[in-house]
Amino acid sequence: MNEDGSADAAWYADDPEVAIDAALVRRLVAKQYPQWAQLPVTPVEPGGWDNRTFRLGDELKVRLPSAARYMSQVEKEHRWLPQLAPKLPLPIPHPVAIGAPDDQFPYPWSILRWLDGESALTAQIVNLTDFAVALAEFIGALQRIDPSGGPPPGRHSFYRGAPLQVYDEETREAIRSLQGHIPSRAAEDVWNAALKASWRGTPVWFHGDVAAGNLLVREGRLAAVIDFGQCGVGDPACDMAIAWTLLSGQSREAFRSTVRADSATWQRGRGWALWKALITLAAHRDGDDEARDARRVIQWVLTDSSQEMPARQPS
């Protein structure tokens, strides 16, 4: 982080991604964990952005960082996930082994237990309000875990859990670049309100990337939460962004009520959702799926009036 509180983008600007395929995974496993060398290796689709994921037999999966900026997440997950798991109401990834870098793959990598379920990106959810409540209960349980010694926000979390000012310059540049394509004044108003809603709470555990792709669904219900690579201890507002990327209407209200987000936290969460949607749209203006999703989130963020409402307490 720079002296002005902004993120230092230079640390990943020249960080090329590594080519990863099933042949590489088979070679790494055979060399370092020969007891699993005979298990089939199958790419998982979608394979992920920060990491590439492959199924290893029926009970395991392999995750490999796609670039250097993600490699610190491997050790973090192996250290902390076993401590978090017993205190959470839903399954999370269970680390089994860490692989070492070698001459063909320069980063540490992970072997974890396989969790059954379909991504919420594509799965049929039976009742979105019930889903939202279950997710909020999970986030609440995560926040109640003792944060002592947990990793504070930083590069490992892409500054999730840090003040939103980290991404102020990037957000304003995205708004400028999208002039004429979005309601720029409304976006500026929401962003400024989020910046003013400063956080003064005690640091708590946050997931850092509560997104549909990291939520597993089984029989129409939330079954597991995966990908804790951006987790840490700090401001939990980043975990509120799911309220505008997946939820709406009654499900959004139920999520807020259950997670007990105060007005300032809700405003900051709205800012996190807006930041990600703006930079995504600025990078994808060609009408692809990412651009369409980003436009939808921006619309939801800018038209949502719930930020004016006090958080309701569960009955």
Image (spheres, helix red, strand yellow):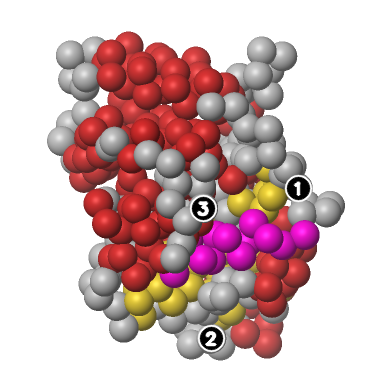
Residue under circle 2?
A: 59
Task: Say if the magenta span includes residue 135.
Answer: yes
**Amino acid under disc 2:** Glu
Vertical order, 219 against 193 (above or below): below
Q: Is residue 149 left or right of residue 46?
A: right
Image height check: is 156 above or below 216? above
- The answer to whether marks 3 and 1 mark residues whose Cβ atoms lie closer than 8 Å is no
SS at mark 2 in the image: loop
- Please give the residue where the numbered disc 1 appears in the rendered image: 151
Taking depth in this image into account, of 41 and 156 the one nearest to the observer is 156
Which quarter of the image is occupied by the N terminus? Answer: top right
Image: magenta residue range:
134-146
Q: How far is disc 3 from disc 1 in space, using C-alphas?
A: 24 Å
User: Nearer the N terminus, badge 1 or badge 2?
Assistant: 2
Q: Residue at x 64, y 57 (%)?
A: 143
**Camera-side mark, 1 or 2:** 1
Q: Residue at 54%, 75% (x, y): give it.
A: 90
Is 59 on the left or on the right of 280, as rendered? right
Instruction: Measure the alpha-carbon separation of dots 1 and 2.
Output: 29 Å
Q: Residue 70: where, in percent of width, then height?
A: 61, 46
Residue 260's label in the rendered image is: 3
Q: Dot 2, crowdedness within 10 Å: few (<14), some or many (≥20)?
A: few
Asked if the magenta segment contains residue 140, the reply would be yes
Q: Does any portion of residue 24 appear in the rendered image?
A: no
Q: CA separation, marks 3 and 2?
A: 36 Å
Q: Nearer the viewer, mark 3 or mark 2?
A: 3
Outermost residue to the front: 315
